Amino acid sequence: MSTPGAPRKRAMSPTKAILLVAKREIDTRLKSKSFVWGTLGILAAIALYIGMMTFIGGREGNTSVALTGDMTTVSAELSASAEALGEELDIREASDPAAAEQQIRDGELDVLVGGTPAAPEVTVQTSLDGTVEVLLSGIAQQAALNTALTEGGLDPAQVQQDVAAAATLQIDNLEESDPLEAEQLFIGIATCFLLYMSMMMYGSYVATGVVEEKSSRVVELLLSTIRPYQLMLGKVLGIGLVGLVQLLTIAVIGVGGAVAAGLLTVPTAAFSAALSGLLWYLLGFFLLATLAAASGALVSRQEDVQSVISPMMMLVLIPFVLTFTLLVGDPENETAEWLSMVPFFSPFMMPVRAAASGVPIWQLGTAIVLSLAAAAALLWLGSRIYANAILRTGSRVKLKDAFGKG
């Protein structure tokens, strides 16, 4: 019986209970060494990749070619032909062929070209770059043709003009090409990969966190003040937000570094991909994490976690693999178009399609509505299993028992 005049203790509201559990997860995991060092490790890998691509790109785009003797007369032609192919050549003249050959031995020069335009003589360290070989072969063939025309009493310039006028190529473009399509597809694939890694890792954290609380009996204390679904939802929300913090940190620093290094020329596409990734991470993680929490509640030992979450992880692995299989070579694949509106497939396929070719608004809306409906159904199912299994210790709880009356 309560003491007269004593203040009545109010029951904690469901929202406050969920937020308290979420805050506990966030505070604990954001300060953990695994989160800090894991994030730093991923950022270091991204920095290393950007550095390697910048170095390789700089090496590939700066082929040095020295011309000597009669070959100096084709310097302008060689430069124009290389530019037409999108190749950067560092073309210079070498007055001393012997010194230029020594530069090749020392790695200071890539190609030395002597001889005549009709018969170039090339010196390289190991092998000749394929593009440079094509350019020099073209110049040699043109020089030989000019010589033959001159010997036949014809004007090479006039013949070339007549040939150019007679040989015309008409191209009808049914659709306008997008020069940035490959880069946008790469952004979409990178977003898909980050979502996959984050969902797999933090989905496992939800399951292991549930088992840890169950085996240590901390869950019994927590459930004395809050309801099971509140504890489960708070844990899912808290761990999900920790994953989101890591994902955003990686995305912002990674995109910023790539833009600064010149590897990305479409920062707006990267920004759009980040927003799309944010949306689908939240939806995808919630779908997975509710199942992870329910699966973790079925066992009492960390050794048994993998056995219960492995089937669930296939719901992530299969869509991820199919995304690469269907969309990398064909961003407008019809099968992927329909699958991208199906829950569990949407978080991986929609960001790739949105970045590479765009998604009709009705398809995006359908995917979001179906994902929300699936999330609501899984929340009900996961809460029921969690509530019936979380306090049962010892052997693994059977699904038919977990589906019993909550």
Image (spheres, rainbow, N blue to C red):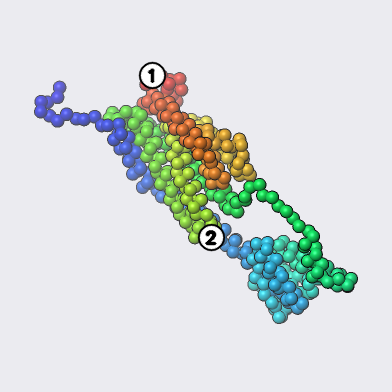
Q: Position of residue 178 (x, y in %)?
A: 60, 51
Q: Which mark is residue 66?
A: none
Task: Please indicate, yes or no, whether residue 233 appears anywhere in the rendered image.
Answer: yes
Q: Which residue is mark 2?
A: 262
What is the distance, in whole Å, between disc 1 and disc 2 at their CAs?
Answer: 59 Å
Q: Residue furthest bottom?
A: 95
- Which type of secondary structure does the marked residue at label 2 adopt? loop
Residue drawn 51% across the image and 36% down it: 362
Q: Is 21 or 221 nearer to us in this picture?
A: 21
- Quarter of the picture containing the C terminus is top left
Residue drawn 78% across the image and 72% down it: 117
Q: Which residue is mark 1?
A: 405
Q: Position of residue 238 (x, y in %)?
A: 37, 39
Q: Is residue 309 left or right of residue 245?
A: right
Query: What's the amino acid at mark 1?
Result: Lys
- Quarter of the picture containing the N terminus is top left
Q: Residue furthest left?
A: 5
Q: Is residue 395 left or right of residue 150?
A: left
Residue drawn 47% across the image and 40% down it: 280
Task: Please indicate, yes or no, whether residue 192 appears anywhere in the rendered image.
Answer: no
Residue drawn 74% across the image and 63% down it: 134
- Which type of secondary structure does the marked residue at label 1 adopt? loop
Dot placed on the residue nearer the N-terminal end, 1 or 2: 2
